[in-house]
Image (cartoon, rainbow, N blue to C red):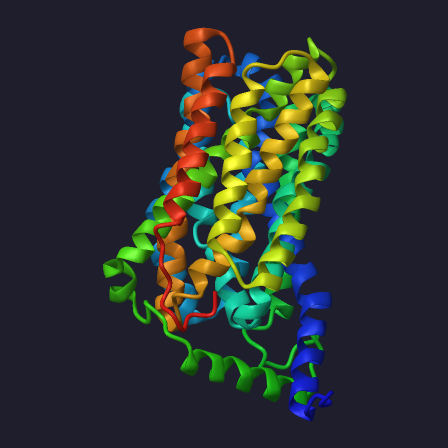
């Protein structure tokens, strides 16, 4: 067996440090981001009655976040590519933390809509900005595992956020504030603190010296060279902003991604109320603990599927089969009764949904490079995130009409399964590393 060259050893050492130091930091940022997006789902257990929000009003306000997010995301990510991830991601986090904490002042539907819209505008560009950073650190053969590891933050946030939010709701009346007000304040402040830390420590790319990653000069040089060689050798579809907008593949990917937030945020914004209904009531703290179960199971499945996708080099069928499993489980939730069967189907639905994310973003980023990657990733994410507006509203409108979650969950499951079929129409270039 031929021993690895010094350059190969330096690349592997650099990637090991990035996995151990950079990924956990980005993971923490995304945990805080996802909590600030969906904590309104837990706040709703108290807030809706306190300020008089109906199911439709709540679902519209929860989803309006994604309208402003979509509107500002592509410009935000283009700015990020030009001014640097460190400064722009810090700006995003500080402003969204301020807006999120300000949700404590909501007193009616108009204020609820306005602050949710402002939160989407503040956070626009964060997620695709992080994905763009990962493309500058991890070669394509390593990327699904890296993205899946980073994006387990979505499900880990659910594991942590459920019990934490249930605990914060129990502060009801402390200091003259309602529990839901404490929830918004105490889950918004970490984003401000972490934004200031990002401004000091986040490296833009392997070539940058950083106290966070602590790469040696040889490691920085070797990894930078490997990424540059890969960029020159692979066939890509998108290299510019115009190329991103004109690419049919990018728009198909955006359509596929649309189906993921439909399910993800239907789950995120309504899961506490779905579980409370299946449980026949229950305290806020109990509901918070039970919501952690589907997210915990999804975290395990997400990592396993991401690793298998990297090991085989296959992306599309991993996405399609995960979508089929998740879609069927969403539909099954509509016909089961009782807490344990409902938790089982919801857990399987969340597992299938979460397992799509790593392979999907590896497939998408394999077709883009340079500024085109920043614009293309933002385009896919922003168009796709319209699903974040649609999903909660499907549940809210159907529930208000039928007084049940069942039919809405079936619709969400069908949408997710269609996304799995659609991804099979994406044919990457032969030389693309997917």
What residue appears at the point 41 percent right and 68 percent down from the top-left corner? 81
Q: Report which quarter residue 170 is drawn in.
A: top right
Residue 233 visible, this orientation: yes
Relative depth, front residue between 219 and 192:
219
Horizontal and vertical percent position of residue 201 = 64, 69
Relative depth, front residue between 91 and 346:
346
Q: Report which quarter residue 37 is drawn in.
A: top right
Task: Tell me: residue 69, above or below residue 412.
Answer: below
Task: Tell me: residue 5, above or below residue 123.
Answer: below
Relative depth, front residue between 417 and 205:
417
Q: Is residue 416 left or right of residue 192?
A: left
Relative depth, front residue between 369 and 206:
369
Q: In which quarter of the image is the N terminus?
A: bottom right
What residue appears at the point 46 percent right and 16 percent down from the top-left corner? 407
What residue appears at the point 54 percent right and 64 percent down from the top-left corner? 313
What residue appears at the point 34 percent right and 50 percent down from the top-left corner? 425
Horizontal and vertical percent position of residue 376 = 36, 60
Residue 150 visible, this orientation: no
Horizontal and vertical percent position of residue 380 = 38, 52
Q: In this view, does 350 lie to the left or right of 390?
A: right
Task: Tell me: residue 110, above or below residue 371.
Answer: above
Horizontal and vertical percent position of residue 207 = 57, 83
Extreme-front residue of the structure: 1
Query: How many numbered discs sit on the rendered protein?
Result: 0
């Amino acid at each position: 067996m031929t021993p690895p060259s010094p350059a190969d050893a330096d690349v592997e050492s650099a990637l090991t440090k990035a996995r151990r130091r950079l990924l956990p930091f980005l993971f923490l940022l995304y945990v805080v981001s996802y909590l600030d997006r969906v904590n309104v789902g837990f706040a709703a257990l108290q807030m809706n009655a306190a300020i008089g929000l109906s199911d439709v009003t709540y679902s519209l306000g929860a989803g309006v976040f994604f309208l402003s997010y979509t509107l500002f995301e592509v410009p935000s990510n283009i700015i990020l590519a030009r001014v640097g991830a460190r400064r722009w991601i810090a700006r995003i986090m500080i402003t969204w933390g301020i807006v999120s904490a300000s949700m404590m002042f909501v007193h009616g539907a108009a204020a609820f809509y306005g602050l949710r819209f402002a939160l989407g505008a503040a956070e626009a560009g964060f997620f695709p900005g992080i994905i763009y950073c990962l493309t500058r650190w991890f070669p394509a053969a390593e990327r699904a595992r890296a993205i899946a590891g980073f994006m387990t933050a979505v499900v880990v946030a659910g594991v942590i956020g459920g019990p934490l939010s249930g605990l914060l709701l129990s502060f009801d009346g402390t200091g003259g504030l309602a529990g839901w007000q404490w929830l918004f304040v105490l889950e918004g402040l970490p984003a401000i603190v972490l934004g200031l830390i990002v401004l000091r420590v986040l490296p833009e790319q392997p070539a940058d010296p950083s106290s966070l990653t602590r790469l040696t000069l040889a490691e920085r040089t070797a990894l930078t060279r490997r990424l540059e060689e890969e960029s020159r050798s692979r066939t890509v579809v998108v290299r510019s902003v115009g190329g991103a907008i004109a690419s049919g593949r990018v728009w198909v990917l955006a359509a596929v991604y649309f189906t993921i937030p439909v399910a993800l945020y239907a789950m995120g914004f309504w899961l506490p109320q779905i579980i409370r209904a299946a449980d026949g009531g229950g305290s806020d703290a109990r509901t918070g603990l039970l919501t952690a179960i589907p997210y915990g199971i999804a975290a395990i499945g997400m990592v396993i599927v991401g690793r298998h996708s990297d090991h085989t080099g296959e992306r599309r069928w991993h996405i399609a089969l995960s979508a089929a499993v998740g879609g069927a489980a969403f539909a099954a939730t509509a016909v089961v009764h009782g807490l344990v069967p409902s938790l089982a189907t919801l857990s399987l639905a969340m597992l299938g949904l979460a397992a799509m994310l790593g392979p999907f973003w590896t497939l998408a980023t394999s077709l883009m490079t340079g500024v085109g990657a920043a614009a293309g990733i933002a385009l896919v994410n922003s168009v796709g995130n319209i699903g974040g507006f649609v999903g909660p509203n499907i549940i809210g409108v159907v529930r208000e009409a039928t007084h049940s979650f069942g039919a809405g969950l079936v619709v969400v499951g069908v949408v997710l399964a269609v996304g799995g079929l659609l991804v099979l129409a994406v044919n990457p270039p032969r030389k693309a590393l997917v």
